[in-house]
Amino acid sequence: MAVTPPQASFLATPRGKLTLALLAAVAFLDFVDASIVNVALPLIRSDLGFSEQALQWVPSAYLLTYGGFMLLGGRAADLVGRRRVLVAGTVVIGVSSLIGGFAESSGVLVGARLAQGLGAAMTLPAALSILTTTFREGSDRNKALGVWGAVGGLASAAGVLLGGLLTNGPGWRWVMFVNPVAAVLVLGGIFWLISDDRGRKEVRNFDLRGAVLATGGMLLLVYSLVEAPDIGWGAGRTVGGIAAALALLTSFVINEHRVERPLAPLSVFRINGLAFANVTQLVAVAGFLAVFFFLTLYMQNVLGYSAIQTGVAYLPVTAGATIAAGVTSQLLARTGTRPVIVAGALIAAGGVYYLSGVPVGGSYLTDLLPGLVVMSLGLGAVFVAVTTAANAGVPQDKAGLAAALLNASQQLGGALGLAIFTAIATSRTGDLLATRTPPAEALTAGFQRALLASSIFLVLHLILLANPP
């Protein structure tokens, strides 16, 4: 019997390494834009005249369109060509960032952030689907996804550091101006390294109704979750918005059952591990994103850290996530994804639980650093393993859809986590302030309660994994 020779590793070639570096750069650009503006918010508010309530829309506008258009962006990559969608999204990010950098009013900046999120919703699923279709399943793909996961962990912390350096250096507008420069470099790499796949599939009878229902439902759901902490969970607008969003998404599912060429064929959820990976991604991000949010507030509002000091404080997280991602990519072939997710979730939950004990006069070396390092190791492992599980066995013509579903779960998890844990922290702090507790103590107690809840949320990973579908 003839033996089929093993295929050569594309990742081992110079072009393969450059392709992976390019796709990682796209991911970094998208992930970092979610957090890079946070430390610049006080200066943005004073320069452009934002109200306290309106200021939240500088970061939230990006998350709104990022999550809302993710499914449409991913499916468009499958149907009209991944390189074409990647190019279009990169151009949108570059142009909108340039407009945002020159903004002289709050409305223009928020509009630019909405457009940035739309661009990211196009580029991220396109880039991830290019990665999973370029590097074959097995060692090559595990290593590539290890790099992808490391970049995700790196960008979350690097955004705070870069935002601080730019804000305290050339000014907050450079938080926006760096994107056009990066976009030009990325575009050059795309045309050089990524083959044109526009002729791969003809688009006929596009599911416009499904696109409207899915995008409208996701936009309304993320918007309602973002607004909930400010207007109240029991407010009519919150309840009505969430109910309307669920109705739209239910209608979307019904529509996908009935149409001949659905936007998102529901058969994709029969792929082993895909639905489960999306649920675990949602739970994980809900916990992790809240940790970064509350620790940043704790360091700046309680410990008095500057923007740069806060960014530097997260550097160990980038190192830990990078190391964990590299180790995880080597382990997956031997252990599978589920044991790694279990171990990673348990480790991360332990780190967050440690952080929930931060005191008013905390020390970085004893109260923050140990928890951050432990959490980062779990974070890197979970993200790489979940991304691998979500893309295993996905056919090429649905790779963009699978990537979009995973990243939509990430954005929804982030919005849901911030909404829930902010309400927990605010309630605890408000109760203490009502009893005339000193503000620093009240704030810290709120952060402690929210971080404790985050650690419990992460343990839900273990419950989910112990009872697989």
Image: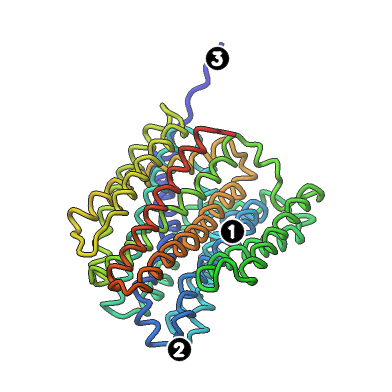
Which comes sooner in the sequence, label 1 or label 3?
3
Q: CA distance from mark 2 to mark 1?
A: 29 Å
Is 428 situated left or right of 370 in this image?
right
Quadrant of residue 246 in the image? bottom right
- Return the residue found at the far top: 1
Front position among marks 1 and 3: 1
Residue at disc 2, secondary structure: loop
Q: Which residue is mark 3?
A: 2
In the rendering, which numbered label is found on residue 70? 1
Is 304 situated left or right of 339 in this image?
left
Instruction: Provide residue 244's location: percent of width, then percent of height.
Output: 70, 64
- Quadrant containing the C terminus in the rendered view: top right
Residue at image position (30%, 64%) is: 444
Amino acid type, residue under disc 1 in the picture: Met
Which comes sooner in the sequence, label 2 or label 1?
1
Instruction: Provide residue 159's location: percent of width, then percent of height.
Output: 35, 64
Q: Which residue is mark 2?
A: 104
